[in-house]
Amino acid sequence: MQREASSVQRVAVVTGANRGLGLETSRQLARAGYRVILTGRHIRKVQAAVRALQQMGLTHTEAALLDVTDEAGIKQFVRQTMKHHGRIDVLVNNAGQAFSKGFGETQSVFDTPARLVLAAFETNTLGAYRLTRAVLPQMLRAGYGRVVNVSSGLGALTDMDSGWPAYRISKTALNAVTRVFAAEATANVKVNSVCPGWTRTDLGGPDAERSVAHGARGIVWAATLPDSGPSGGFFRDGEPIAW
């Protein structure tokens, strides 16, 4: 049986939510009692994902069109969400692309043009930057907020290697976005990066070591931190990892 919604229900926004980690994160948050707004660039796919969740009894879910590369669209989305719900308590910046052919790809940096790195930045880094910049002020006014940037160990400088250069560089920069926003957040507005681990998604491939449910648990942990929880950190499975 799903948990009943509380009288003051927290509202969570998840980007890139029509499949994979975004969809599973939405499912877990909805099961925890949150009203979840699933977003994506292809509204029919997001609506199909919402229908699947509602068939599970997770009726406090809804779909919204959102392209994280569209600044005007982001502002409109935030305005509409605040008008309809009056709050955004959780933001999960999950939308992203690999900009590589597959997890086993060992693409050299010399085969990766600057335009591909720029494209990775537009979605993987600046998408989170734009949306956090639009949402965080109302979290600060409310005195509560949880922002989770879905990053990757592939972006950790301490373990940097070859392969996936556009993806790696964009995720390293995403971690910087986390630190910059966390530095300007108040005590009960938490901004963190999470590495979900090597997960069996379209990105991770079928040989990945973790299920999607396992990968999403660390994201949900950061999205539901208690008031005493950390901010400005990089985590996997709720434990700090090196930048």
Image (tube, grey):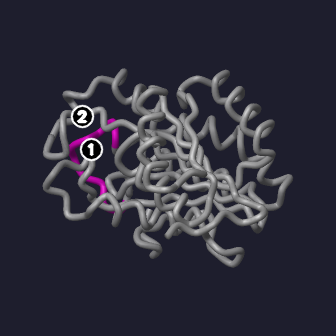
Instruction: Choose top left, top right, bottom left or bottom right for residue 195.
Output: bottom left
Residue 162 inside the magenta-drawn segment? yes
> Which residue lies under the disc numbered 1?
203
Can you say whether 236 is above or below 83 in the image? below
Instruction: Choose top left, top right, bottom left or bottom right for residue 85.
Output: top right
Please indicate whether residue 201 sits to the left or right of residue 181 in the image: left
Can you say whether 69 is above or below 199 in the image? above
The residue sitting at 48% across, 42% down in the picture is 50
The residue sitting at 49% across, 56% down in the picture is 57
Q: Residue furthest right?
A: 141
Q: Nearer the viewer, mark 1 or mark 2?
A: 1
Q: Give the residues in magenta.
A: 158-167
Amino acid type assigned to the residue bearing label 1 in the image:
Leu
In terms of depth relative to the viewer, which is nearer, 239 or 205?
205
> Which residue lies under the disc numbered 2?
100
Helix, strand or loop status at disc 2: loop
Which callout, 1 or 2, points at the residue further toward the start of the chain? 2
Q: Name the spot of residue 147 as percent of width and height, x first.
A: 62, 55
The residue sitting at 41% across, 60% down in the picture is 216
Helix, strand or loop status at disc 1: loop
